[in-house]
Image (cartoon, rainbow, N blue to C red):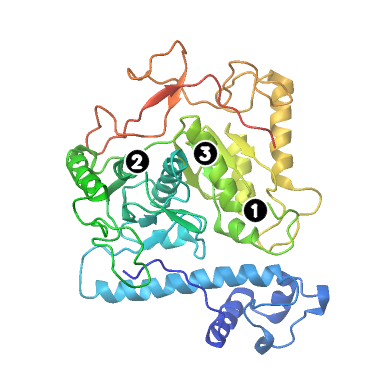
Amino acid sequence: MHNEYGTICYCDHTGAAFRVWLRARHGSLEALNDAWGTAFWSQRYTSWEQVLPPRATQWHKNPGQALDFHRFWSDEVIAAYREQRDAIRAHSDRPVTTNLMLPAYQNIDLWVLARELDVVSSDQYPTSPGLDAAADVAFHADRTRSLAGGSPWLLMEQGTSTVYDRDRALAKEPGDIVRHTLGHIARGSEGALFFQWRQSRAGAEMWHSAMVPHAGPDSRVFREVTQVDEAVARLGELAGSTVTAPVAVLHDSDAWWALSMDDLPSPDLDCHAELGRAHRALWDAGVTVDFAHPEHELGRYPLVIAPALFLMSDAGAENLRRYVEGGGTLLVQHASGFVDERLHARLGGYPAARRCARRWASASRSTGRCGGPSGSPCRTDHTAPSGASPCAPRARKRSPRTPTACSRTVPRSPGIASAPGRAGTSRPAWRRPTTALWFAGC
C-alpha cells in the first residue's frame, strides 16, 4: 500500500495539525515553553497560534521544536497508514504492508510503523559499489529483520543494476544481482522483488534500472535476473526460518533526529553513518547483527553496542543499566547520553559513558577480565591483548570451505549455506576464523 511514506511538508495545514498534536503532548503553553527552552533568545510563546512548523530561519532552529516536529510527522504518517489499512481490511483479509525506505531515510519512527504492518517489507539500493555494496545489503537486511522482530520479512524493491553513489547512478558489477538477492534471503527475507519490469523510455526515472533494460532481454542484466529465479526456486526449505545474532546495535529514531539538529558539538556527528560503521566492523569480523531499541529486552545478547545514542531517555538508560547489572557487556561509543528525551543537556556528566566506564573499570580491577559474559582477559586501557576475544560469541564449527589452525570462530555474514535448515529452524551461515573481536572503549 502506498510507496515509501514520509515526505515532509511545512505548510499552514500542517502547522494547524502540529498545534493540535502539541496540545495533546504538552497540555499547556507553559509546558511547551519549558520543553523547548524558549527562555533562550526570548522565544517564549504566549498563544498557540504563534507556534509554527520549524521553517527556514536566519540562524539555528529551536532544537526542541524540530524534534517534536519529527515526532509529530511520524505520528501523522503512521495514522494515515492505519486509516488506509483499515479501509482495505473492511473488504479484504489479505495481508497489508508498505515498503519502508532504508537505510538513510528516517522521517518516520520505523519501530512504530513496523508494528502496524502484517508483513514488514522494505526497499534497498546500495550507496557504494563492490564490497561496500555487499556490506550495505547486510546493513539493510539486518535492520529490516530487526524491525520485523526477528520474523521473516520481504524485500519489496531492489534495482537490478542500480547503485546510488552520491550524485551518480552506477551499474552493479557482474554477479551482484544474484549475490545481493541471496544476501537478503540469507538474512531473513522470504523473497525478493525488483523495481521495475521494463526500463522506461521516458519519464522521471527513465534511467532507473529494470529487469528488462533498454538493451532488451538479450543482455547481461536480464540473464542474471533469470539466474536469480533459478537460485531462489531451490531455496524452499528456508521459508519461515529465522536468523539469530549474538550482538545488538542500538538504534533509536529520537536519537537519529536529535543528531540532525543545528549547532551540534561536531558537524561530523551522523547517526546513520555511526550505525553503518558499527555494523560494518561486525560484518567485517563475521558477526551477525540485530538492531534493537534502547528500551527493548536485551538479555539474550552477550554484547550490545550503542553508537551515537546522543539522545537517551530515562527509560532507555535504566534498561541499559539493568542489562549491564545482569551480566551483559555494553559498549557505549562517543556522543552518547548527552541529552534527555526533551533534548535538554544531561547535567553532572553524560550518564551512559560514565556508567559504562565505571562498570568496565571495576570489572577489570577486580578480576582482570572484561565485564561481559565471555570473561576474556583484558587490560584496564581496554586494548586487546594478542589473541584475546573479549566479546566473541561461543565457538562454532569450522566451515569446511575455510581451512584454519585457529581454534575459535565466529559466524560470518550469512550466505547461502550448503545444507540449509528446514522451516522453523535457524539459518546457518558461512563461518570464518578470527583471532579477536575488539572495540575501543567509551
- Residue type at tag 1: Met
Crowding near pointer 2: few (<14 within 10 Å), some, many (20+)? Answer: many
Q: Quadrant of the C terminus?
A: top right
Q: Which residue is mark 1?
A: 312
- Which class describes the residues within 10 Å of circle 3: few (<14), some (14-19), or many (20+)? some
- Disc 3 secondary structure class: helix
**Residue occupying image coordinates x 31% and y 52%:** 160
Q: Give the residue pinned by disc 2.
A: 183
In the foreground, 437 or 324: 437
Mark closer to the observer (3, 1): 3
**Vertical comparison of 75 with 220: above or below:** below
* Left or right: 200 in relation to 123: left
Tell me where residue 246 appears, x and y as whole percent: 46, 33
Spot occupied by residue 290 in the image (x, y as percentages of width and height): 46, 42
Identify the secondary structure beneath mark 2: helix
Query: From what the image shows, is residue 55 above or below residue 430?
Result: below
Gap in angstroms between the C-alphas marked 3 and 2? 15 Å
**Residue at image mark 3:** 280
* Labels 3 and 1: the sequence-earlier one: 3
Q: Position of residue 72 (x, y in %)?
A: 55, 72
Q: Earlier in the sequence, mark 3 or mark 2?
A: 2
Residue 27 coordinates in the image, percent (x, y): 64, 78
